[in-house]
Amino acid sequence: MLFRRLYTSLACSNHYPSFLFKKFTNPSAIINSNPLFPCPNSFNLSLQRPNFIARSFISSNSQMGDSRRPRPVPIPSVESADKAELYRALEASLGSQFSSDPLVPNPNPLIMVISGPSGVGKDAVIKRLREERENIHFVVTATSRAMRPGEIDGKDYFFVSKEEFLSMIEKDELLEYALVYGDYKGVPKQQIRDYMAKGCDIVMRVDIQGAATLRRILGKSAVFIFLVAESEATLVKRLIDRKTETKETLLVRIATAKEEVKHMKDFDYVVVNKEGELQRSVKLVESIIDAEKAKVRQRSAAI
Ligand SMILES: Nc1ncnc2c1ncn2[C@@H]1O[C@H](COP(=O)(O)OP(=O)(O)OP(=O)(O)O)[C@@H](O)[C@H]1O
């Protein structure tokens, strides 16, 4: 049993020649067939004793002369030994201290792009996510449009003049921008850099066109989430209930939404924001973040 554990830990370690583990499944076969183990018979014998003497495997693999080899280390019985004593004996036997350094580096900051048709619930999901999750920066967009009553500069948008916006374009300070109904809207790069440097994840809320532009710029280095209602009918009712649209803009938004749903395939994840189940949608977005953080090959975005 003890030998099997030792064998498994050595098989996962970089310190030991892999051929020993690839080729053999029976530990005693390794011992009996490998010239690096000078005394196969004595090893087999030692397995039969409760407190057997283990040789340092790492050292026995070295090219050092016998005089420099560490002496055999007694390993106490697993059943009766003190935990600390057993731990130290295993360290001594393997010839190195067990490191407390993290085996896995901190995950990279994530850039998430949340998009979906108008009225699907992007703002509602993001608002709830903001309340529930720390270490996320929600990107504040720059716009050249006038501030509406109740809006706060730096929170809802960065309100800048058209000239200032054009100067930001000129200086390549925007990750992406668009002219929407005569007003510029864009994502300032520096804000994203600053928060990523602090280790924060980044969330951007953009329309479908913005998401397509960001996909071209960021490729697979960002996560793209498409938010959708369970049906067209639900989406329309939600827009009507919001009472923010005129009949003309309602028509435009609904017609646009029908087209936008076709772009779902360009995203990495789809979250169905079902009627009355906002919390479930937020949990699903959080699960996506958690899954991305657990990826062996992390996305790595450079802005
Ligand atoms: N799961 C849900 N169930 C019921 N109502 C919801 C749900 N999610 C969002 N809503 C409501 O639907 C309406 C539209 O949501 P929201 O404004 O967040 O959409 P949006 O995608 O940000 O829209 P737009 O792109 O037009 O700004 C809001 O009144 C919101 O409270």
Image: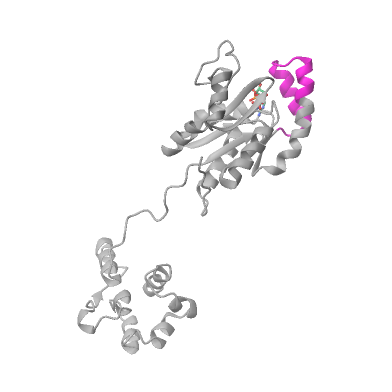
Quadrant of ligand 1 in image: top right
The quarter in which the N terminus is drawn is bottom left
Picture quarter containing residue 81?
bottom left
Any part of residue 76 in sight: no
Give the magenta range.
229-253
Magenta stretch encompasses residue 7: no
Check residue 242 for magenta coloring.
Answer: yes
Colour setup of the view: one colour
Q: Is residue 177 visible?
A: yes
Front-lying residue, 244 or 45: 244
Q: Is residue 180 above or below residue 213?
A: above
Residue 208 as seen in the image, left or right of residue 256: left
Q: Position of residue 187 (x, y in %)?
A: 56, 30
Position of residue 216 measured from the top left corner of the image (x, y, whole percent): 63, 42
Q: Nearer the viewer, residue 195 or 288?
A: 195
Tell me the chief SS of the magenta region. Answer: helix
Using residue 300 as the reference point, say whether residue 8 is left or right of it.
Answer: left
Q: Number of marks in the image?
A: 0
| Residue visible at 42% across and 51% down in the picture | 105
The picture places residue 276, in percent across and down from the top left corner, at 66, 28
Residue shown at 51% from the left, 33% from the top: 189
Q: Residue furthest left?
A: 67
* Quadrant hosting residue 234: top right
Q: Residue at x 61, y 38 (%)?
A: 214
